[in-house]
Image: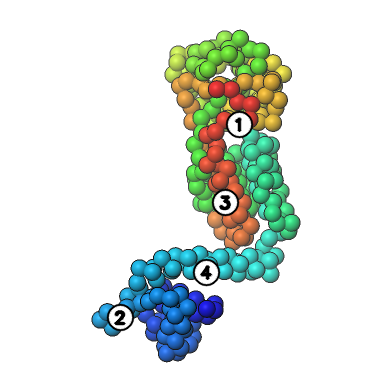
Amino acid sequence: MNIRQIEAFHAVMETGSATRAAERLNISQPAISKLVKAFSEHCGFVLFHRKGGQLVPTREAQILSGEVTKVFSGAGRIKDVARALREQEWGDVSIAAPPAFSVGFLPRIIAENMQLPELRVQILSRTSPQIVEMVANQQVDVGLSVIEPNHPDISSRLLVTFPLVCLLPANHHLANRRQLHINDLREEPFISLPSTDCSFSRAERAFQLSGGAMKRKIEVPFSETAAMLVAQGAGVALVPPFAGSDIDPNLVVRLPIQPVEQTDLWLLKPKQRHAPLVVEIIEDLVDKACALIDRPPAGASA
């Protein structure tokens, strides 16, 4: 058994005929038939039956084809990597994300998956409106945003939808609850994001629907800053579940809040730029991490 025989079998399975397989491999039809016959003999079972002038794969051939396809997919991946290295597409990749993602979320998943020494990643912390502008202007390869861009020069897709949580100082009088209602926070000093931030608008809406109002004490640009202020006892905040994930869990408590307010996370790429292979790798890592995003972060309280 050799790779040429496997290649001939794969071509016949994909094209459905020895003639078309021969054309694909640029060899004669008798040569294809000879290779497939030799492959069948090595396998020890029949691979095709003839029916009405057509080759019909046996059940064994169909099962074997699935494994062969994996081999050729892997070979295709090797070709892509070789091309990327040849054309210097590994190199640098830049990612812009809000601090709630760029401080703990992104560094963690990238550090755990840095198998390639040639890969160099630049992580930039920006607000979502700034990220939309950077992606549209092709200043970064990938952007993560909590607002949908709706921009003609941006390709975007929804990664995940997650609930906001209430972050409290560990010694807060509400910290022993299992969950909170927005009404519980009416008289609490609130650390909020700017009114232009979607997290602020969702928190404000929750208060309005309950007939109350947010008691804003401090306004900060990022949820990470809000989390650090909560840890210092300056107030409470509604933040993404992973904001402040690196803060000592003995200093803060995270509690689910009712009514639940959801926030979206979008992945953005420049529409007009050819995406290097390395961008696909980063996207895959982010996708895998987002699949776990509904799990409470380390130190979270139930």
Q: Quadrant of the image for the C terminus?
A: top right
Q: Nearer the viewer, mark 3 or mark 4?
A: 4
Outermost residue on the front side: it is 44
| SS at mark 2 in the image | strand
Q: Nearer the viewer, mark 3 or mark 1?
A: 1
- In-image side of 70 versus 123 (left or right): left
Q: Position of residue 144 (x, y in %)?
A: 59, 43
- In-image side of 11 versus 220 (left or right): left
Name the residue at 30% across, 80% down: 50
Precedes in sequence: disc 1 or disc 2? 2
Precedes in sequence: disc 2 or disc 4? 2
What amino acid is found at the position of numbered circle 2 in the picture?
Arg
Precedes in sequence: disc 3 or disc 2? 2
Q: Is residue 133 above or below residue 226?
A: below
Q: Position of residue 250 (x, y in %)?
A: 69, 21
- The residues bearing labels 3 and 2 have C-alpha atoms spaced at a distance of 43 Å
Whether tag 3 and tag 4 are in contact, CB under 8 A, the answer is no
